[in-house]
Amino acid sequence: MKRSNVALALAAGLGLVAFPLSGLAMGSGGMGGGGMPSGGGMNTPQEPQYDPVQEYQRGTADLQAAKYKDAIRDFQHVIDVTPKAADAWLMLGESRSGAGDEKGAEKAYERSVKLDSNSIAAHRELALSLIKLKQNDKASAELAALQARSTTCAGTCADAADLKAAIDSIQGAMAPPAAGTPAAALVAPSHLSLATPEAGDGAYVRAVSLINERRWDDALTSLGQAAVALGPHPDILTYQGYVWRHKGDWAKAEGFYRQALAIDPNHRGATEYYGELKVLKGDMAGARALLARLDNACTFGCAEAEELRLWIDHGGDPAA
């Protein structure tokens, strides 16, 4: 990407310095079109039946208020629009667990793990759910996977603290309870529902700084925290795709770009970056189709269209 400092694009599209971190509407310009991810509120002609960002945040609020049936409905709405949103499945599991449907929670957690095998929270919640269902063998397998990952990390990776906390939580739940311990205290409560839009915005801003520093793994951790708090926002999904592209996993990158465009088909950042990925893959026809989409969306022209045009003309990154 010629604009190697991502903050340049954000300064034009989001105004990270000039605007507050919450309450701005999400549109279709730049990376996200004018606001922090917590703003929600899509206004495109292809608007889905439910705004997944608003439904996710409504679900989080209902979960915090112990309105579990309402939270189940909210997160199901998110999944109806974005069935591959791993964090929505994770929160659906949390909601079902709160409602007493532990078997339903287990299935939701399993789906979340399948969609995002890197999610420490999903593995943790699945293990805790399995313990509640007295399936300790399966829970032990989840614990072993996290322990192996922690050994590889050796306390140096961005996820080190989260790994340790997850392992401690699972081991604590597996340990024989002390005499007189109430049943409700046998499994440590989850902290997923404590995420707030403000915390999500903060994680998002940290991720942008980390991307600028090319600290890809740390950026993914912050983007993951933003996604848990805010849900499947196209800006977050686009940056997740951007980071995975730079880490060399083009399949994952494409998946995130496609998710972003499924929610907001006019999202200029996702369209540009997806077009750049197609150039890298040698799919020039696909890149030109995405450029045509940008040209159609940018009535008076836009930086995203011009950047993708340079990529196509150059046959790759024009700054390389």
Image (tube, grey):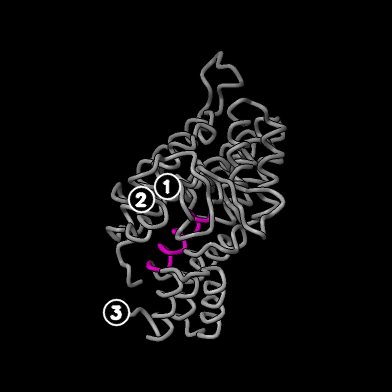
Nearest to the observer: residue 279 or residue 155: 279
Label 3 neighbourhood size at 10 Å, few (<14), some (14-19), many (20+)?
few
Q: Residue at x 52, y 74 (%)?
A: 295
Q: Which residues are magenta?
A: 234-246
- 2 and 1 marks in contact (CB < 8 Å): yes
**Alpha carbons under labels 2 and 1: distance apart:** 6 Å
Residue 167, by quadrant, is: top left
**Which of the two labelled residues, at mark 3 and mark 1, occupies the earlier sequence position?**
1
Q: Secondary structure at mark 2?
A: helix
Residue kind at label 1, given as amino acid type? Gln
Question: Looking at the image, is 192 positioned above or below residue 280?
Answer: above
Residue drawn 55% across the image and 78% down it: 292
Say which of 28 and 113 sits in front. Answer: 28
Task: Give the residue type that dot 3 points to.
Answer: Ala
Q: Position of residue 34 (x, y in %)?
A: 46, 51
Mark 1 — residue? 147
Q: Residues within 10 Å of mark 2 (few under 14, many from 20)?
A: few
Mark nearest the camera among 3 and 2 is 3
Element type at marker 3? loop
Q: Amino acid at mark 2?
A: Thr
Q: Picture coordinates of residue 159 (x, y %)?
A: 37, 47
Residue 276 falls in which quadrant of the image?
A: bottom left
Mark 1 surroundings within 10 Å by alpha-carbon count, few (fewer than 14), some (14 through 19), many (20 or more): some
Q: Taking the image as drawn, is residue 143 in sight? A: no
Q: Is residue 312 above or below residue 184?
A: below
Q: CA distance from mark 3 to mark 2?
A: 37 Å
The residue to which callout 2 is attached is: 151
Q: Is residue 238 magenta?
A: yes
Which quadrant would the N terminus be assigned to in this image?
bottom left
Judging by the rendered image, the residue that carries numbered circle 3 is: 320
